[in-house]
Image: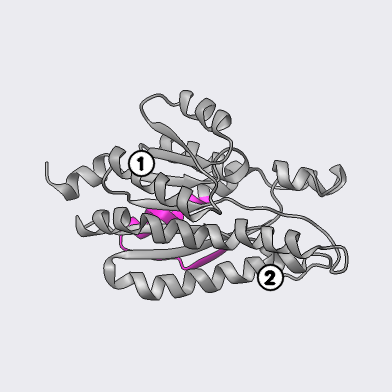
Amino acid sequence: MNAFEQAHVEPVAIVAGASSGIGRAIAEALVARGWHVAVLGRRLERLQQLAAAHPGKMHAFACDLTVPEQVEHCARTIAAWRPSVQALVTSAGDFFVRSIESTTPPEFERLWRVNVFSKFLLVRSLLPLLQAAAGAGVPAAILHIASLAVYQDFADESAYGSAMHAIIGLARSQDVELQPRGIRVATLSPGLVRTELTERSFPEEVLATAMRPQEMAATACHMIEVIRQGGYIPELLHKR
């Protein structure tokens, strides 16, 4: 079996921010579609429990995605497990609803580090593994999770909304640079989804109409599959 055939038989994905919410749902959906998945995040116990539910198909790697040294170490560990990766999903994120004057500078910076800086670190550190897959003749996919806040403005979300806009800019620039190397970069922007993050910020009457993480997972898998088949959906807004 040559490298091209092997990549299609046993595709490998990395899902960052997989301990809960959309990231967890995407990781499970990829496994259900025949992928091997590395799940990344800070909460090792949760990741290990998730991986244990999918023995032989999912592997847990703990790191703080905002710390360069930890991300680079994690990338080396993953490379020892699998030398090439067909897809990277960056789902790690933070969210809060707070006015401008009540948002402290450390809180603003922390939100940007989790939502934007982590995506830069992951792509930078994992690029050799993605290029190895692309070099085998299989298009590699990077999917950044953004938000409805890219397309609709909300009060008391200046920190979050600005970070989501930055994700779009990051993805567009990365795609222009990486497309010649056989890697496409796309963004998925969900509307309101019921997760641990949104349950902390919205009342039940608002969450009653929220989407499920599994709905986003199905869309994410579709976008990845389109790229692997030679197509491309650069940006997708999924809302009701």
Q: Nearer the viewer, residue 127 or 57?
A: 127
Q: CA distance from mark 2 to mark 1?
A: 33 Å
Q: What segment carries the magenta color?
A: 219-236
Q: Given the current orientation, which residue lies at the most extreme front position?
A: 69
Residue at position x 20%, y 43% from top? 6
- Which sits in the foreground, 83 or 199? 83
Query: Taking the image as drawn, is residue 66 in sight?
Result: yes
Spot occupied by residue 40 in the image (x, y as percentages of width and height): 49, 42
**Hey, what amino acid is under mark 1?**
Thr
Q: Amino acid at mark 2?
A: Ser
Q: Name the residue tied to disc 2.
A: 162
The relative height of residue 100 versus residue 144 in the rendered view (above or below) is below
Q: Is residue 146 visible?
A: no
Q: Position of residue 168 (x, y in %)?
A: 55, 70
Measuring 84% from the left and 69% from the top, which residue is drawn there?
100
Tell me the quadrant of the picture where the N terminus can be found: top left
Quadrant of the snapshot with the C terminus = bottom right
Residue at (43%, 70%) from the top-left corner?
174
Residue at far left of view:
1
Dot 2 crowding, Cα within 10 Å, few <14, some 14–19, many 20+: some
Which badge, 2 or 1, is on the more N-terminal residue? 1
For the residue labelled by badge 1, is the local secondary structure a helix, a strand or a loop? helix
Depth order, front residue of 101/224: 101
x and y percentages locating residue 186 in the rendered image: 47, 64
The image quadrant that residue 46 belongs to is: top right
Q: Residue 150 at what x, y percent from top left?
A: 65, 69
Looking at the image, residue 132 sits to the left or right of residue 45; the answer is left
State how the image is colored. Answer: one colour
User: Which secondary structure lies at badge 2?
Assistant: helix
Closer to the camera in the image, 6 or 101: 101
Residue 77 marker: 1
